[in-house]
Amino acid sequence: VEGILEKKGNGWQARWFVLQGHEFVYYTSEEAYQNGDPPCKSTVFSLDGYEVLVMDDAQFSFTLKPVEGSAAEKKRSWELRARTENDRVKWVRGFLGATMTFDGTVREDTYLENEGAPKRKSRWGSSFGSFIGRPGGSRSGESKASEDEMSGHGATKSPLA
């Protein structure tokens, strides 16, 4: 999944997000992505240990939140919003597919390096590999969450609400 999302930082900023597997990057614009520029923060963000919270609002927002007790517990939350409800549905489905395992539990892929410290798996290693200069990102991470599962009152954990 790829496209424009707004992320909350110092105000709301439109960014070009690319989600592949259980990792994502974001760029200042689609043009920066198409030109092969490095992603913002020069970082691939893992969704291991995150859950998706859908807000019941007219601003098409949702949050990627670290799960208590997971390896991601002390990482940042991502407050995001789409431009339309259809875009929000597309992104929430993609993020749900990236954060959940087949049995409906939160994904936590870790392995041990030589030092014995837990590290996240990345199919791209330490580089940005397939994120840079690869328009038309993967659509294989989409889950089968319905629009009903993503609506409701207040913040809802989808699809396990």
Image: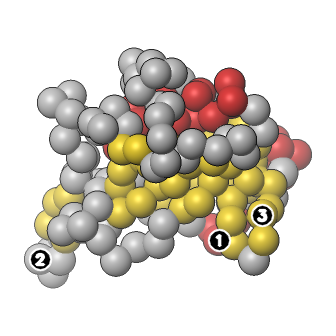
Provide the secondary structure element on which disc 2 rests.
loop
Q: Which residue: 78% across, 39% down?
A: 83
Badge 3: residue crowd in 10 Å (few <14, some 14–19, many ≥20): few
Q: Quadrant of the C terminus?
A: top left
Amino acid type, callout 2 = Gly
Q: Earlier in the sequence, mark 3 or mark 1?
A: 3
Picture coordinates of residue 24 (x, y %)?
53, 50
For disc 3, the marked residue is 12
Question: Which of these two is toward me, 91 or 151?
Answer: 151
Q: Helix, strand, or loop for circle 1? A: helix
Q: Residue 56 occupies which quadrant of the picture?
A: top right
Q: Quadrant of the N terminus?
A: top right
| 117 with respect to 135 (left or right) | left
| Residue matched to label 1 | 41
Q: Is residue 90 depicted above or below 4 in this figure?
A: above
x 63%, y 53%: residue: 80
- The residue at which mark 2 appears reads as 116
